[in-house]
Amino acid sequence: MNRNIRLLERPTPREAVELLKESIFRKRTSIIVGKCIVRYKGRARSFLGEGDRVILL
């Protein structure tokens, strides 16, 4: 495995937050994959039911 890639499988919330903070500080890209629902409330409202999602930061 490439030493520049870190992989967490089923991290605790604390582990996930710490790795994301480190990634943001180091200006690294993070890819988060998981099953979730999405509720958005802003100028409009939106809802996505449960499904697999990929989030890029």
Image: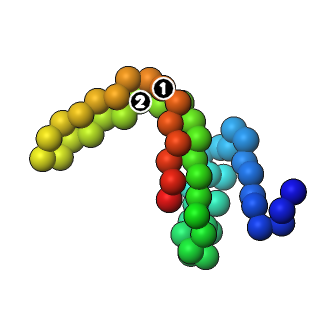
For the point 53% across and 42% down, which residue is it?
Answer: 54
For the point 53% across and 30% down, which residue is it?
Answer: 52
- Nearest to N terminus: mark 1 or mark 2: 2
Question: In the rendered structure, are the residues bearing label 1 and label 2 in contact, judged by CB atoms less than 8 Å apart?
Answer: yes
Horizontal and vertical percent position of residue 17: 57, 56
Q: Nearer the viewer, residue 3 or 19?
A: 3
Horizontal and vertical percent position of residue 8: 72, 48
- The quadrant of the rendering that contains the N terminus is bottom right
For the point 54% across and 69% down, which residue is it?
Answer: 24
Q: Which residue is mark 1?
A: 51
Q: Measured along the vertical axis of the image, is residue 18 above or below residue 25?
A: above
**Local SS, label 2:** strand
Q: Which mark is residue 6?
A: none
Q: Measured along the vertical axis of the image, is residue 17 above or below residue 53?
A: below
Q: What is the crowding at mark 2: few (fewer than 14 residues within 10 Å), some, or many (at least 20)?
A: few
Tell me if 46 is positioned left or right of 6 in this view.
left
Tell me if 47 is positioned left or right of 7 in this view.
left
